[in-house]
Amino acid sequence: MIVGVTGGIASGKSTVARAFASLGVPWVDADDVAREVVEPGEPALAEIAERFGGKVLLADGSLNRRALRDIVFADPSERLWLESVTHPRIRQRIVAHLERLQAEGAPYVLLVSPLLFESGQSEMVDRCLVVDVPESLQFARTAARDDVDDKQARAIVAAQMPRSERLSRADDVIDNSGNEQDLAVQVAELDRRYREMAASR
């Protein structure tokens, strides 16, 4: 069984994943996989460099993320091209990682992805778990974590899928606005339920 974990920025997806990991549940992080597919030597990086030239590479040959981000944010057609190059490879790599963890005998595995719904990765999972916090807390955490002002933090949150839509598509929800103990109780209860579901499949 695969459980997709998602949530808005600064909702605490990684914290939740680590809480599940402490109970013996492995996870695949879609952001890590997205970085893997554009590492030096990867075909995707070669295609990106061929299209945009040396300005998207750093001196060591790795991807200049800021330069690439500037290009694709300025031109939606370039963003679509980039997604056409990277998304299939990301999906393929995620599947390989999930299959490996399942083969190692995990009771169930997590796919942690900020764009679970937007990228269509929700089709790859059996249940969708949304990590939820009030927007006011998102603003505060984003501003503190990313060293941006309140206005920028609000813009980042506004650019994401609306909280109400995320929640409407969730099979399960964790409220991460409390303390670590509150979170641990919720994770333990979901872990119990997921193990039962996985065993009965």
Image: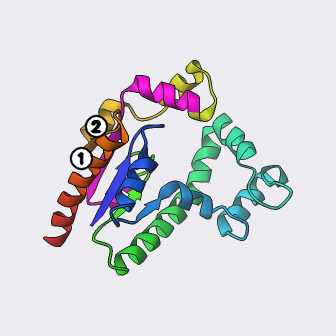
User: Which residue is pictured at 37% across the width and 80% down the height?
Assistant: 104
Report the residue that reaches farthest toward the right: 59
Callout 2 amino acid: Leu
Amino acid at dot 1:
Asp
Give the Cα distance between marks 2 and 1: 9 Å
Q: Which residues are magenta?
A: 121-144
Q: Is residue 184 above or below residue 50?
A: above
Q: Quadrant of residue 23?
A: bottom left
Residue 102 percent coordinates (x, y): 35, 75
Image coords of residue 140 (percent x, y)? 50, 25
Sooner in the amino-acid sequence: mark 2 or mark 1:
2
Which residue is tagged 1? 172
Rendered-image quadrant of the N terminus: bottom left
Residue 167 is labelled as 2
- Magenta region includes residue 140: yes
Q: Which residue in the rendered view is the most extreme toward the top?
A: 151
